[in-house]
Amino acid sequence: MSAPRVMIQTPYYLIDKARLLANLQRIATLRRESGAKVVLALKCFATWAVFDLMREYMDGTTSSSLYEVRLGKEKFGGETHAYSVAYADHEIDEVVSHADKIIFNSLGQLERHGGRAGGKPVGLRLNPGVSASGFDLADPVRPFSRLGESDPARVAEALGRIDGFMIHNNCENRDFERFDAMLTQIEERFGALIERVGWVSLGGGIHFTAPEYPLASFCARLRDFAARYGVQVYLEPGEAAVTDSASLEVSVLDTLHHGKPLAVVDASTEAHMLDLLIYRESARVEPDAGPHRYLVYGRSCLAGDIFGEFDFPEPLRVGSRISIRNAAGYTMVKKNWFNGLTMPAIAVRELDGSERLVRQFAFQDYVNSLS
């Protein structure tokens, strides 16, 4: 007998624990076969309603700000890594109080704040000059990048104050051969430094949880790297941990015909799936099949608020439901109050198929976000 379905007013994000578990089981295999530790990148996904499941398969969290490191400490547990492009003087002590490791982006930040690390392990971000990124906007080695130190000689002078390194140069990298080649280049440039520290984080952006990814080869490469340099390897997956584990559930509010059939739904790309707009991508719906094709718009006043063009088995009408896939990574963490639109609720589909509403947002939340 199937579990009861809770009727929830759209729009809402629906996190499916069964889909999430599939990713986490691949992470469990990686940890076991490679010896690497895995920490969740909160910049990508920080919906703590499912941390109860995630903490069973991951070693902790990594952050990009004071609030993220505090969230990781209070809601996830395990190891709590603190990183920021730049720490402010007034926040560094609180950051340290929540962190197990603190990673500095530059030698200047290390010099300014390293003495306030309270004896906790200190890391430095390296910029290897090579990356896998299809978007200049997200490329950490783009010209004039501020992300990490690139001069081995300068880094060598500070080794006495550094316990480990963080290298984040992958972005949506599904190509193991590309990862392998870049890691070889990193070894050639920074190998003499790596063998003098205790741990190295290779960051995130590696889609090793995809079913077609050669996980065994990836594990072997990480295992050999760790043994060669005598380091503990960390990975910082965000999207890889939560890929296709959530959807944005929406309803059609209106249909029009202006050169082609159009549909307007009760959500917005700019407010609720911002990366679609930033990276000029289309959403994914299931099923995207059938004889009725519509251009699906969001309800904001932005002319280009478009989820994409999709095929449906039946004509869309007011009240028709659409499930927009892959709404976990870089989605809930970026939602905003543009146009004062209703913020999607957050719901969880448990492993037994039952659904529960974990958070709703109301007018007072909108008011409290302003002044």
Image (cartoon, grey):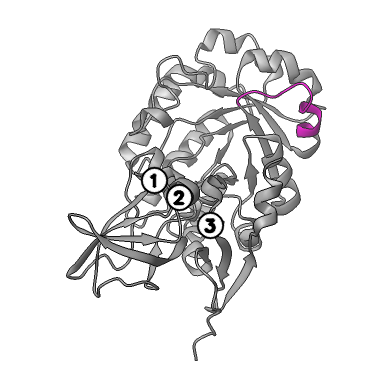
Q: Which residues are magenta?
A: 85-96
- In percent of the image, x 52 and y 78: which residue is there? 353
Q: Nearer the viewer, residue 27 or 323?
A: 323
The label nearer to you, 2 versus 3, is 2
The label nearer to you, 3 versus 1, is 1
- For the image, the number of numbered tags is 3
Q: Amino acid at mark 3?
A: Ala
Q: Nearer the viewer, residue 10 or 358?
A: 10
Magenta run includes residue 91: yes
Q: Which residue is mark 1?
A: 276
Marking on residue 337: none
Marking on residue 273: 2
- Asked whether residue 35 appears in the rendered view, the answer is no
Residue 94: percent from left, percent from top? 80, 33
Q: Secondary structure at mark 3?
A: helix
What's the CA distance linking mark 1 and mark 2?
Answer: 6 Å
Bin the neighbour count of mark 2 within 10 Å (Cα to Cα): few under 14, some 14-19, many 20 and up: many
Tell me if label 3 and label 1 are in contact, CB under 8 Å: no
- In percent of the image, x 52 and y 35: which residue is there? 227
Comes first in the chain, label 2 or label 3: 3
- In percent of the image, x 59 and y 57: which residue is there? 57
339 left or right of 305 in image: right
What's the CA distance linking mark 3 and mark 1?
Answer: 30 Å
Q: Amino acid at mark 1?
A: Leu
Q: Quadrant of residue 90?
A: top right
344 left or right of 205 in image: right
Quadrant for the C terminus in the image: top right
Residue 332: percent from left, percent from top? 54, 51
Query: Relative to 311, is 111 above or below?
Result: above
Q: Amino acid at mark 2?
A: Met
Residue 195: percent from left, percent from top? 56, 23
